[in-house]
Structure formats: C-alpha cells, structure tokens
Image (tube, helix red, strand yellow):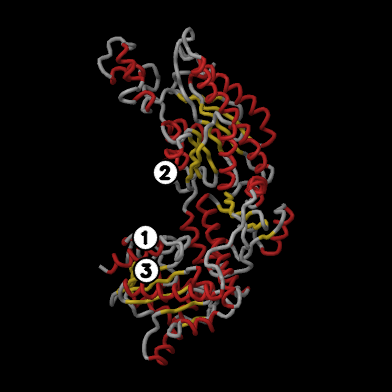
Amino acid sequence: MSLAVIREISNRYGSNPAFVLAGGGNTSVKDEKYLWVKPSGVPLAKIREEDFVKMEREIIRRCFTLDDTAAPAEREAMVTRLMAFATVSGNGRRPSVEAPLHELMPFTFVVHLHPAMVNGLTCSKNGETECARMFPSALWIPATDPGFILAKTVRDALAAYKQRHGRDAVVIFLQNHGVFVGADTAQEIDSIYSTIMETLKKAYDKAGVPTTLQTGTPDDESIQKYAPLLRGRLGDGKTPLTVKSLPPFRVYAGPLTPDHIVYAKSFQLVTDDPSPEAIAAFEKEHGYKPLVVEVPGKAVFCAGKNAPGAETVALLARDGALVQQLAAAFGGASFLPDERRSFIENWEAESYRKKVAAGGSVQLTGKVAVVTGGAQGFGLGIAKELAAEGATVVIADLNAKGAAEAAAALAAPGGAGSVAVNIADEDSVAAMVAEVVRNYGGIDLFVANAGVLRAGSVKTFEKRDWDFVTGINYTGYFLCVKHVAPVMALQNSACSAWTDIVQVNSKSGLVGSNRNGAYAGGKFGTIGLTQSFALELVSDHIKVNSVCPGNFFDGPLWSDPERGLFVQYLNTGKVPGAKNVADVKLHYEKQIPMHRGCYPSDVAKAIIYAVQQPYETGQAIPVTGGQVMLN
C-alpha cells in the first residue's frame, strides 16, 4: 500500500540526521482523490500510517483562488481554515502548512527535506547560479514567505517550467528552505536524493570545505561557571531553562531557514562574558533573549524549556553553523532579509508546530531532577513518577549499564539521562555533578535516594559492614550535598528560583530498628544533616528536606523470591504460624494502619510536596501509612 511506503520513506529519512533534524521536513502520498500528508508537530522518524492527514485534493486546490492581496495574517488564516475543511482523516492532526505545495507536484510521493548539505547551497550567495550548473533540470525558487505565497509562487514557476521543458519538475530547490523531490516510486525518491547528495559532496570537496562541523576543545572550567548562571539569566527570571553545553564552534550569524529561526532564533549571542548586561543588550536589540550563546574558544551554550528543548536548539545551532560553513563553497552565507525573518518569527503555523512538538505542561516541567540509586527499586519508582510529572530525570547509579537502560525505558516527556556515580567516593560525586552541568546546565531537584542495608546484632556486627553502611547512607549524603549545593547556589543567584535537595530516609530514621543499628543510626544522623544543611543553605534559595518511607514490600529487599526478607523470615520462623510468604507479608501489613506497604508513588508525592511547598525546609516527612507518627 502506498501509505505504508511513504511511512517507511519518512521513518528512514527522518531517522538520518544527515537529512532531518528536530522532525523537520514533510512527506506526502496521493491518489486521484486524496492526499495524505505529514501533520504538524509529528517527527518523520516516528510517524505512523494513522498519523498522516487525509485531505481532499480538490479542496486543497481551492486555496489558489483565494485573494492574495489580503493582509498576510488574514490570508494565512483563510488558508488554515480551508486546509481544515479539506481534512477528512478525523485523527485530530493538523496538516502540514505545505500541503498545497505537495498537491502541486503531480507525483505519487513527495518528500521535502532540509539536509545541511542542501542548505549549504540554498542558503548561499551564489546558490541560484550554482544550482543551475549542478542541477540543470531542477527548479529554483527564490526566497519567498512560506505558506500560501510560497505555494502560489511554486505553482506559477511549475507551469512556466512545464511550458518551457514539456515535462514536470522533479526537483525543486527553495532558497533558504531545502528541497522538494517528487516521484512515483520509493526507489526513484532514493535515487534522486542520492544523486543530489553525491553531487553536492563533490562540490564541497572540490572547494576544500569540510562537510562536518569544525569544532574546538571545550573548556570545562567555563562550562561549570557559565552553564548554571545561564540557566537563570536566559529564563524568565523565575523558572530556569535547561542548558546544554557544546564544544566551541562559530555560530551562524543570521537567519537561515524557518527551522533555524523557529527553534534556535535568528541571531545568537557571541561574547567572552555572558553577563546580565550582555544579555540585556542583546534582548534590547533583538526583542528576545538568545537561546544560543557562544563564548569563543570555550563553549557554545544552548537553552530550552527542558532537555528535549535544549537538545533541539543544540541540533539546530550545530546545523546552522554547518550550513554557514558549507555555504563558503558557493560564495558565503546569504541570510534572510528582515521582512522574511519577521514573517517567520510571527507565523502562526510555525508557532503551532513548535507548541505541538513541545507537549503539555505538568507539575515539574522544566526541572532537572537527579535521582541517586535510580537504576532499580525505590529509586527507579521515584524516577518514573518524577518523569511522569514532566521533570528531566537523570538517573545516577553505581550500576552504569542499569542506569542507562532505566533512563532509556522511562519515556520521559521532559527527557531522561544517566550518569555513573559511587556516592561514597568524593571524586566520583564531583564528576557526576560536573557531567550533569555539562548536559543540563544545573540541578533543580536532587533526590538523595541511594542507600544500603546490612543488619545484625551490635554484639557481632563487623566494623567493615558498619563502615560500608554509614559510608554510603551518611557520608555519601554529605558528599552529594557538598557538590550539588554550589551549583544550585550559582544558578539561583541568576534568578529568583528556589531549588531542592530531598533525602530519601526511612521510618528507621524516626524510630529505632532492632538489630539494625548501622542503618537506623545513619538514618537518624542524616535527619540531623538535613536540618543543618537546611539552616545553612536557605540563604542560597536551597530547601533541604527528608522523606521517611515505610517498608517497600514490593521491592527486592522484601520480595526477592530467593533472598528477600519475606523468604528469610519464613525460613527462620520469625513469624509464628506463617506457612508461606503470603502469611509473612500479611503479618507485616497488619502492623500498618493503612494495611499495605509503601509504594514509590507515595514517596514521589511527598517529594513533589516538598518541592512545591515554598515554606518548608529542614523537615522529615513520614510516609509510613500511619505506622510511625510524629510526636
């Protein structure tokens, strides 16, 4: 089926960063009556057959009868309404704004992409001349406002082309906007794109222009200094942005294509010191704060609402820089004039696409949350809950492979990552924090969850076991706060935001635990640390709290079928009359007024409460189902 073919084409090209970035580009397939086109906000790499918007071709063509003398905003609104009227798919998707242009090309398949290799040509000063030389059978469209005007311009150009050559144009290069390719088979689409890319590669090689972005060596001292500050300085003064740090390169110097303008802005800030004054001067000149900041020779910083947003800005920043680099082969970069740039910046269709791609907002959207010991058990459960609330979650764990796998499985709308750490080793903790700063700019919520348990009588407990438990549960918490707090203080100094450290304690931190002195003692001690840290760090806008869960019966500590406590207690006869594991579990559940164990979601809700409560610090919040109550 043709729809399956265009889905396969879309997924294949959409998954190749040499052709598609940030879901850009659009594809379509048509029969005699209907056109199926990629919807706005859905990336080509992940598009499904049911995502394509089915439209009546005859109604799409009516857009060419609209009054093109109307004001731009009114005209685009009319086209939008007409495209909605033409839509018959009923899947709630909005068709690509370039559906009329897809309709114009009389081929079964149309694939519109924005490869950097192509835009090195389309965004160059000599692009039209060089295009005619390298691709004599292609159609070149000068820079035109996207949407309705572009479609009418292409319609007239196609008609003139066919009258002149006696055939339809298969390839259309759009100045500052990529390339359209039409064909009746997937094989033809692939062959045409292959020829385009091979021809351009030869031209770049001949001109001595590298086809990969030339970057320098990042200066980590500058990254650790500026990334946390830029989180606050580039935001709205209250909510920090996520900042991704890249190796230094020469950022693009002006507006190139709609994608670059919409996602990474038309202009970037280049400065040796991204001070508040430098950012304010940039904002005064351009009307917005930069999303890309180049500190020459040191690093490039890319800011977004959350991790996926910052990653998208980074992709477009690098792509724009590469396009500018490639354009040197054809006389240098040609930037869009102010009137075209302004049209795109205020184009409702692109604002809609960006909004759909960004997704909705939930409680922790935009917050970077690090969870230690997050690869399994309670920590993983907490990470899942925080991810569901929109946080960008970083799983930090001694088990690097498990942390990476857990992060990949989170499907977090705010993004997820992982980092290896041994919280009992100070160098490892320092490296963890530095890595988080490089990738996200800082930390809004640090969940100190990693912990271990070894129980035994005080009469026989080995010192090495004592040191192991307290080294992680007590000293590890201190080391994490020691290295996290300066980063939080730095980013908070750049805005009015507050950040949070929440330690996952235990009910054993509130009441003693028989034959479990090392664990309970460490947990009692860390509540003292929480209170002390809270008193010291409040002046840095850092709140510090502990949450004290009850028993996580569904976790491996209790429920492991071979070594879990339920099995151990059954085998040792600790619960009189118990005949099976279910009896043992029931015995312990009866000790809890709520008659069940603690779930990660219970703990996550307490953590979120601590974050959202502006007047709470230094507290130990019980999450025990009533088993332990504060006096």
Task: Describe the element under mark 2 as helix, strand or loop.
Answer: loop
- What residue appears at the point 41 percent right and 46 percent down from the top-left corner? 411
554 w.r.t. 174: above or below: above
Q: Which residue is mark 1?
A: 47
Nearer to us in this view, 193 or 449 = 193
Amino acid type at mark 1 = Ile
Decide if residue 64 is on the left or right side of residue 142: left
Nearer to us in this view, 5 or 464 = 464
Crowding at dot 2, Cα within 10 Å, few <14 / some 14-19 / many 20+, comes out as some
Q: Position of residue 416 (x, y in %)?
A: 47, 45
Q: Earlier in the sequence, mark 2 or mark 3?
A: 3
Nearer to us in this view, 178 or 188 = 188
Q: Which residue is mark 2?
A: 410
The span from disc 2 to disc 3 (Cα, nearest Å) is 30 Å
Crowding at dot 1, Cα within 10 Å, few <14 / some 14-19 / many 20+, comes out as some
Residue 102 — which label?
Answer: none
Amino acid type at mark 3 = Val
413 w.r.t. 425: above or below: below
Quadrant in the rendering for residue 34: bottom left
Q: Which residue is mark 3?
A: 37
Nearer to us in this view, 236 or 575 = 575
Q: Position of residue 56 (x, y in %)?
A: 33, 73
Decide if residue 445 is on the left or right side of residue 18: right
Task: Describe the element under mark 3 as helix, strand or loop.
Answer: strand
Amino acid type at mark 2 = Leu
